[in-house]
């Protein structure tokens, strides 16, 4: 995408040097930085300098490539795989990319591993861009159908699933970008998405692209749906079960419940590497990341207190699950690069699996 007239991807390389947009600086500052080691790649994933399931997967692939430039032995392949695989537990794209890199590197002669690793990481990155472009194509058709009877299409999204969460285009925002570029009047309701406030990243992307939006508090979505101010919901996903259960940023499940109660279509934009074909029951088997309590405690009211203590009550007790699972029966469709499928039907998921050549 373009920032101030200049094209950027969220991650890129120059030779064997790796660069990212540092998302912890946004939306206040636009900062690019060089990532200088495989350990630093892991740190960037953990600290959310890069975030979004597809981008995490691509970043991990480049982390393996960087490791091969450091030490191309089989021992280092396995060591780096374990280090990177332990950074974020929920997003399946991480493991997808690492498994692919591991398999290729194990069968490559040691003297060729560095070049092969960088080449394969490039392929994974380019595939991500193509998948997200096709997701946009398929999602655009859904928006066009609504636009036939609406002067403006109002879309609600949750968390950031734009180009910053991928290499380019994004998942949930890809159809929105394409609809805007085709002249469709779009307005986006942007959940702030606490506690990391990724909604600010979505707002920044939409503003940069000239798309109308309104930033709203997380709990406003149900009210807007009740008052017929939302035409559709599009979110991204960090992992989808083989039965179509959607794991996404905490709060997504509540949006799906509100959408169902108000007869509003709820879609998840999902590149197929985000589907975990080994998990059937998403609610039971998808691991939910519990994040640092300081993400919750770092707010204006509590920061006025010494060490975040509450007057007379001591240190507040905090739980900070990063994700929740929306059961398949609440999902109107998965917008994939192949097609839009209705996950409530196991048959359609099996057909999608077969189209990908999965056994």
Image (cartoon, grey):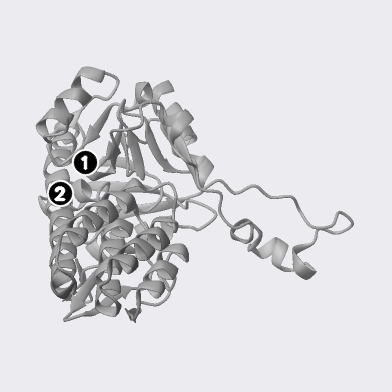
Would you place residue 119 above or below residue 156 in this image? below
Q: Position of residue 341 (x, y in %)?
A: 20, 28
Quadrant of image for the C terminus: top left
Quadrant of image for the N terminus: bottom left
Tell me which corner region of the image, top left, top right, bottom left or bottom right, holds residue 141.
top left
What secondary structure is found at the residue carrying circle 2?
helix
Crowd tier of the residue under label 2, counting other residues whose Cα lies within 10 Å: few below 14, some 14–19, many 20 or above:
many
Q: Earlier in the sequence, mark 1 or mark 2?
A: 2
Of residues 37 and 259, the one nearer the viewer is: 37
Which residue is painted at 33% across and 53% down in the image? 94
Of residues 229 and 66, the one nearer the viewer is: 66
Residue 226 in sight: no
Residue ID for mark 2: 131
Of residues 126 and 1, the one nearer the viewer is: 126
Which residue is painted at 79% across and 70% down in the image? 306
Q: Is residue 42 left or right of residue 96?
A: right
Crowd tier of the residue under label 1, counting other residues whose Cα lies within 10 Å: few below 14, some 14–19, many 20 or above:
many
Farthest-out residue, right? 312
Would you place residue 339 above or below residue 312 in this image? above
Q: Is residue 199 left or right of residue 267?
A: right
Which residue is painted at 20% across and 18% down in the image? 347
Q: Position of residue 299 (x, y in %)?
A: 63, 62
Which residue is painted at 29% across and 76% down in the image? 71
Residue ID for mark 1: 272
Q: Position of residue 260 (x, y in %)?
A: 39, 23
Would you place residue 148 above or below residue 301 in this image? above
Q: Is residue 160 left or right of residue 18?
A: right
Q: CA distance from mark 1 to mark 2?
A: 8 Å
Residue 272 in sight: yes
């Amino acid at each position: 995408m373009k920032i101030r007239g200049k094209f950027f991807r969220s991650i890129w390389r120059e030779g064997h040097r790796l660069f990212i947009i540092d998302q912890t600086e946004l939306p206040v500052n636009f900062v690019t930085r060089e990532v200088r080691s495989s350990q630093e790649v892991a740190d960037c994933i953990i600290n959310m300098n890069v975030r979004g399931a597809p981008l995490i997967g691509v970043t991990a692939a480049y982390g393996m490539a960087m490791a091969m430039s450091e030490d191309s032995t089989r021992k280092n392949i396995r060591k780096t795989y374990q280090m990177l695989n332990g950074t974020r537990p929920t997003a399946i794209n991480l493991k997808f990319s690492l498994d692919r890199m591991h398999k290729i590197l194990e069968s490559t002669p040691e003297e060729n591993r560095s070049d092969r690793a960088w080449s394969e990481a490039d392929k994974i990155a380019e595939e991500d861009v193509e998948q997200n472009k096709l997701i946009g194509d398929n999602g655009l058709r859904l928006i066009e159908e609504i636009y036939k009877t609406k002067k403006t299409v109002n879309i609600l999204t949750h968390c950031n699933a734009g180009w910053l969460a991928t290499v380019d285009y994004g998942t949930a925002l890809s159809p929105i970008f394409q609809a805007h570029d085709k002249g469709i009047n779009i307005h986006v309701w942007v959940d702030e998405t606490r506690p990391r406030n990724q909604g600010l990243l979505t707002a920044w992307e939409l503003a940069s692209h000239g798309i109308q939006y309104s930033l709203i508090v997380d709990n406003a979505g149900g009210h807007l749906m009740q008052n017929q101010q939302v035409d559709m919901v599009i979110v991204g996903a960090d992992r989808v079960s083989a039965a179509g259960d959607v794991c996404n940023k905490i709060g997504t499940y509540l949006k799906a419940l509100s959408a169902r109660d108000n007869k509003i279509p709820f879609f998840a934009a999902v590149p197929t590497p985000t589907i975990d074909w080994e998990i059937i029951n998403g609610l039971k088997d998808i691991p939910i990341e519990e994040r640092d309590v300081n993400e919750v405690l770092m707010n204006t009211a509590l920061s006025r207190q010494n060490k975040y203590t509450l007057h007379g009550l001591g240190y507040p007790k905090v739980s900070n699950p990063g994700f929740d699972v929306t059961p398949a029966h609440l999902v109107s469709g998965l917008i994939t690069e192949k097609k839009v499928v209705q996950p409530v039907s196991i048959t359609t998921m099996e057909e999608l699996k077969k189209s990908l050549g999965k056994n």
